Amino acid sequence: MTMQRDADVTPPVELEPSDDQPTLEGSAAQPPDVSRISILEPDEPRPAPPPGASEDDYRWHTYRRFPSGRPDAVKFVDTYKSFGSTQVLRGLNMGLPEGLVSMIIGPSGTGKSVCIKHMVGLLMPDAGDVLVHGKSVPKMKDDDLFEMRKKFGLLFQDGALFGSLNVFDNVAFPLRQHTEKSEEEITEIVMRRLSEVGLAQDVWKAPNELSGGMRKRAGFARALVLEPDIVLFDEPDSGLDPVRTALLSRLIADVHEDMVEEAQEKQKPYLPTFAVITHDVMTARRIGDFINVLWKGRIVEAGPSEEMLNSDNEFVRQFLAGEADGPLSMD
């Protein structure tokens, strides 16, 4: 992944140690009893609503997290972020289990894309913490932050290709910027990734010669060339018709499976983790191994897809079914 905004990064903020802050760790030893699979201890009261909010505003937030059986590659710990008077993240506790395809879903304006910017250190929290493989992003020095970003690949909504470069050079750009690989090695890597996304015959085309779906696939190939541990997808299905959305979803799932197998064969320290921000419920249902439902800057519920698709929470059920009737309205 190539980050073009180093100069715009907010300086690291010194935070107090967060070991005693609430986390989302579940216990695999607990039986699948909904009342016990929670970030809360049995006798602990529900978290207080954020400043300025009422208990009624968060009545659908159970804060339950069904265990995934995996450690979290990325974890938000009681994270707050505001822009002026607008509160976006309001005490967010969220985890992305390592080696899985996680979905971050929820209504518009609830902080999903802001989460991505916190993961890669383009934004820093006002309070709380963000951990990547156990290391605090806000506490990283600039050099460490730059190295940490190499763990990430990022696919933007429109592919974010450089208009002056052809497909090959767009995909090769991160390798030329961040590695000492020869052009022969770069060509082998780029062609392998372009073949995976079905663009091996389009390497010399300019971005304006590609369809929207092709631009997204080229952006996907570019996100993979540095062999990232974590790949983030910011609404990859935006602007695509239902068939191409389904095909892109299948591609994401297939590439993730291949990357996990490759990481296991090479005995890499981390299994590849994918995180997909989407409004498309069908995308979440098709490829999500783990689903985080985000609303009003906090997680309503989170867990493996089979648990979430059978949730008894009215908000979760309404959102994942795409129904008009339920707690979520046009307000």
Image (cartoon, rainbow, N blue to C red):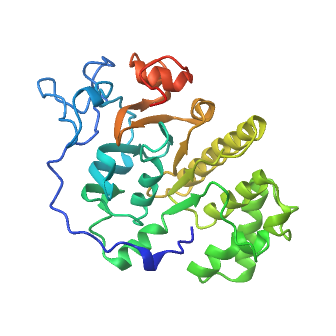
Q: Which quadrant holds residue 85?
A: bottom left
> In this view of the protein, which residue sits in the foreground, 50 or 255?
50
Q: Which x, y percent locates residue 39?
A: 24, 33
Q: Which quadrant holds residue 81?
A: bottom left
Quadrant including the N terminus: bottom right
The answer to whether 94 appears left or right of 39 in the picture is: right
**Tally of marks:** 0
Q: Is residue 21 above or below residue 187?
A: above
Q: Is residue 305 above or below residue 107?
A: above
Q: Which x, y percent locates residue 197?
A: 75, 53
At 54% from the left and 20% from the top, the residue drawn is 324
> In this view of the protein, which residue sits in the foreground, 170 or 198?
170
Q: Which x, y percent locates residue 61?
A: 31, 29
The answer to whether 7 appears left or right of 137 in the picture is: right
At 86% from the left and 63% from the top, the residue drawn is 209
The answer to whether 88 appears left or right of 177 in the picture is: left
> In this view of the protein, which residue sits in the foreground, 303 or 193?
303
The answer to whether 54 appears left or right of 11 in the picture is: left
At 54% from the left and 75% from the top, the residue drawn is 4
Name the residue at the left extreme.
43
At 45% from the left and 30% from the top, the residue drawn is 304
Q: Which x, y percent locates residue 10?
A: 35, 72
Quadrant including the C terminus: top left
